Structure formats: structure tokens, C-alpha cells
């Protein structure tokens, strides 16, 4: 009866020794991370810019698209207010649309523009985001 736990313990010890040996061998055979080079077809980790995603005239495209989305949102929600629409003023009177504009890229590769709380609508509405369809895929 004591033999079974002893055999199991020895097997566990043997297996853990094999696993450690295998991981040591893998570490020795892989070059340090600094020496690894990305494949030639892989892009660098540099983030795309709005101009990369939307083209040379991205400022006009963003301004028109976001203003249209704001108007649409106000039509759907009568309590929603967007300052540029209410004031009949350019979007750029409220936020910068340039290389400093905050954005993310969604899973489909489209930029999502992010405006801080209180810049284009009441603070109670929080940060505002606008998904911008890419002009070309």
C-alpha cells in the first residue's frame, strides 16, 4: 500500500525534472529578444496616424463625418446636445482636428475619434467617440 504513493511521488519528481530540463534547452536555443528581427513582411510597431488611415485630406473628412454624426445623434435623441450643431459653428471651434487628435483603431481597422468630456457636449455625457469609416479598404 505504501508503494503506490512512493511510485507516484517518484514519477512526479521525474516529470518535473524533465520539464525543467526542456525549458532550459529552449531558453538556450532561442536568441535573446533584442537579437530577434521581425519578418520582412511584418510592419514595425509604429502606430498608424489619421493621415495613414484616412488619407491626405483627413481633416476635412473627419470634420464633415463627425458633424454629420452629431446631427444624426441629436435627431435621434432630442435631449442630446452637441455644441457645434447647436451653435451652428465649426467643429474645430471646440476641438482640434489634427495630428494630436486622440483616436483608437477598432477591430475592422477604422479610426474611432475620442473627444474629452465636456468639449463637444455637456460633461454629463462623458467622453464622446465617433467611428469613422475608412475611405478605402
Image (cartoon, rainbow, N blue to C red):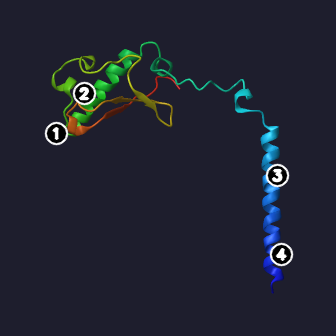
Q: Which residue is mark 1?
A: 79
Helix, strand or loop under label 1: loop
Q: CA distance from mark 1 to mark 2?
A: 17 Å
Residue positioned 67% across, 27% down in the render: 42
> What is the CA distance from the residue labelled 3 to the residue labelled 4?
21 Å
Q: Nearer the viewer, mark 4 or mark 2?
A: 4
- Mark nearer the N terminus (4 vs 2): 4
Snapshot quadrant of residue 6: bottom right
Q: In terms of image quadrants, where is residue 129?
A: top left
Q: Is residue 22 above or below residue 72?
A: below
Residue 47, relative to residue 1: is it above or below? Answer: above
Q: Disc 4 to disc 2, how far (Cα)? A: 70 Å
Res. 13 mark: none
Drawn side of residue 111 relative to residue 71, left or right: right
Q: Position of residue 18 (x, y in %)?
A: 83, 57
Mark on residue 119? Answer: 2
- Asked whether the beta carbons under mark 1 and mark 4 sit within 8 Å of each other, the answer is no
Q: Is residue 84 left or right of residue 129?
A: left
Q: Could you give the CA–CA distance between mark 3 and mark 1, rounded to whole angstroms?
A: 66 Å
- First of labels 3, 1 by sequence position: 3
Marked residue nearer the N-terminal end (1 or 4): 4
Which residue position is annotated with label 3? 21
Please state the horizontal and vertical placement of residue 62, each as a whole percent of the image. 36, 21
Instruction: Give the x, y percent position of residue 74.
Output: 21, 34
Mark 3 or mark 2, which is nearer to you? Answer: 3
Task: Answer with mark 1 or mark 2, whichever residue precedes in sequence.
Answer: 1
Look at mark 4 in the image and give the residue it sits on. Answer: 7
Q: Is residue 17 above or below residue 77?
A: below
**Residues packed near mark 3 inside 10 Å, few (<14), some (14 to 19) or many (20 plus):** few
**Mark 2 packing: few (<14 Cα in 10 Å), some, or many (20+)?**
some
Q: Nearer the viewer, mark 1 or mark 4?
A: 4
Amino acid at each position: 500500500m505504501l508503494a503506490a504513493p512512493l511510485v507516484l511521488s517518484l514519477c512526479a519528481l521525474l516529470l518535473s525534472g524533465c520539464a525543467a530540463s526542456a525549458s532550459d534547452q529552449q531558453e538556450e536555443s532561442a536568441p535573446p529578444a533584442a537579437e530577434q528581427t521581425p519578418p520582412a513582411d511584418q510592419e514595425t510597431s509604429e502606430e498608424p496616424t489619421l493621415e495613414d488611415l484616412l488619407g491626405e485630406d483627413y481633416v476635412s473628412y473627419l470634420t464633415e463625418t463627425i458633424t454629420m454624426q452629431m446631427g444624426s445623434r441629436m435627431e435621434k435623441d432630442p435631449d442630446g446636445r452637441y455644441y457645434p450643431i447647436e451653435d451652428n459653428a465649426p467643429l474645430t471651434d471646440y476641438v482640434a482636428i489634427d495630428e494630436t487628435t486622440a483616436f483608437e483603431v477598432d477591430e475592422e481597422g477604422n479610426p474611432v475619434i475620442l473627444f474629452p468630456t465636456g468639449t463637444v457636449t455637456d460633461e454629463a455625457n462623458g467622453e464622446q467617440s465617433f467611428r469613422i469609416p475608412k475611405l478605402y479598404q
